[in-house]
Amino acid sequence: MPPSLQGRAQQAKSQKPDRFRNLYGMRTADLLRDCWRAIKKHAAYGVDRVRAQEYAPNLEDNSRHLVERLKHKRSRATLVRRHSRPHGGGKVRPLGRPVVEETRVQLAVTRLHTAIDAQDVRRCRSGYRPQVGARDAVDTWTITRQCGRDHWGVDADSTGCFDPAS
């Protein structure tokens, strides 16, 4: 985690009632540069047809312009290139590919919110936390169940839950 995010996490932890109002201003060049390292460089291009390899030579200029647009709130989300991939059983799965710059911004927002919001999540909760997976949840639940603190459990199947109504 970059030092800027560590500072935000410490601030969120020590000053619980405070709100973070200027998320545009928190997306700095350092954070975007760190997010660039995490982007898949050989991934498909978006609607602008610019691949990460083509975006990289002018990375500093592109980053500077992006930070400028974000700070002045002039950056808008772009269209997403849509295509369908075959899924099991003859079904197709719709996929969307944002442009490289939008991917960087989305990753920066995700990391920023994770650093801030992780301070409010109980350590015993496993869902939607970085570095914690389903196995951790099962292990925790199994140990808790054996010790007798929980007396009930829920098993749910959400298959088809988000399919559009026909």
Image (tube, rainbow, N blue to C red):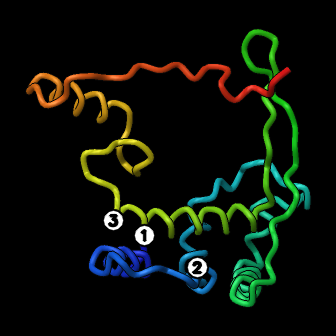
Q: Position of residue 2 (x, y in %)?
A: 42, 75
Count of number-bearing discs: 3
Q: Does residue 88 sit above or below 124 in this rendering?
A: above
How far apart marks 2 and 1 lie (CA) works out to: 11 Å
SS of the residue under disc 1: helix
Quarter occupied by residue 103: bottom right
Which mark identifies residue 23? 2
- Check disc 2 and give the amino acid type: Leu
Residue at the spot x=82%, y=72% of the render?
Answer: 76
Few, some or many residues within 10 Å of mark 3 (<14, 14–19, 20+): some
Q: Residue 116: which numbered mark, if any?
A: 1
Question: What numbered label is drawn on residue 119?
Answer: 3
Question: Which of pointers 2 and 1 lies earlier in the amino acid sequence?
Answer: 2
Residue in the picture at 58% in, 79% down: 23
Look at the numbered discs 3 and 1 and tell me whether their residues touch, using CB distance below 8 Å: yes
Dot 2 or dot 3: first in sequence order is: 2
Please state which of residues 166 and 132 is positioned toward the viewer in this rendering: 166
In the image, is 23 to the left or to the right of 75?
A: left
Residue 33 picture location, percent across and down: 59, 75
Q: CA distance from mark 2 to mark 3?
A: 17 Å
**Residue extending furthest front?**
151
- Residues tagged 2 and 3 counted as in contact (Cβ below 8 A): no
Q: Is residue 113 left or right of residue 29?
A: left
Q: Amino acid at mark 1?
A: Ile
Residue type, mark 3 in image: Gln
Determine the residue positioned at 10% across, 25% down: 148
Reply above or below: 97 against 57. Answer: above
**Foreground pick, 149 / 8:** 149
> Vertically, is 96 above or below 66?
above
